[in-house]
Amino acid sequence: MAEPTRRSFLMASALGVSAGWVAANWPGIFEARVLAARAAAGEPVEFSFFSKEQAAEIDAMASQIIPADETPGAHEARCVYFIDRALTTFLRESQPVYTEGLQELAAKTKEMFPGAEKFSALAPQQQVQLLTAMEHTRFFAEVRRDTIMGMLAPPSHGGNHDQAGWKLIGYEDTLKFTPPFGYYDTGSD
């Protein structure tokens, strides 16, 4: 019987961890897949955590974090749907941060721009100015993290619509890779 190699140990460990994570998160993964399939089919998707008004605020924030230019941004990648699903599945502990943060966002909007009804109604330059004032808050940090995750997660999780994030970074969604993958696959230790 051959002695186990680092590679076989790492592969077995990765499979075990992956299987455990999938098993623990299966209901959320399945729910996200159903949501993504409905959205891809053009069906209207309702939010589970956010109200429509709250979703518009988070979408506006995400659109400033990863704006569209010659490539799609967070809005086009539908990151707000990923964030909404995450907050009702694997990021439940962040719900209070979002609830309080949305209240802080509304207060900061009125403080900095008297007469403004909501953040999403501000001009893009005003949105950037306000987010710059909030960039050191936990709320902003979590929205930024979740926007990036939504941009790069598999589309089946609700974000990264049309693989916008993957195209942005040049990731190819294929399992057809040619070995060797790195120096460690050459067989020499």
Image: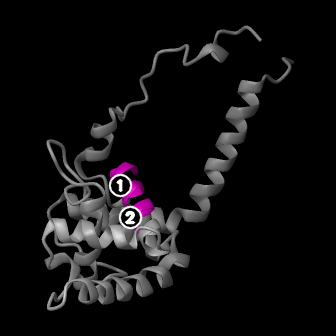
| Residue plotted at (19% across, 56% down) | 76
Which range of residues does the magenta coloring cover?
Answer: 143-156
Q: Position of residue 40 (x, y in %)?
A: 20, 57
Amino acid found under the numbered disc labelled 1: Ser
| Residue plotted at (73% across, 8% down) | 188
Residue 184 drawn in magenta: no
What is the quadrant of the C terminus in the image? top right
Quarter residue 36 falls in = bottom left
Of residue 121 and residue 32, the one placed in the foreground of this image is: 121
Find out whether the residues at labels 1 and 2 contact each other: C-beta distance under 8 Å: yes
Of residue 74 and residue 35, the one placed in the foreground of this image is: 74
Amino acid found under the numbered disc labelled 2: Ala
Classified by dominant secondary structure, the portion drawn in magenta counts as helix
SS of the residue at dot 1? helix
Of residue 69 and residue 179, the one placed in the foreground of this image is: 69
Identify whether 2 is placed above or below 105: above
Q: Position of residue 137 (x, y in %)?
A: 47, 73
| Label disc, if present, on residue 32 of the rendered structure | 2
**Is residue 145 toward the left or the right of residue 74 in the image?**
right
SS of the residue at dot 2? helix
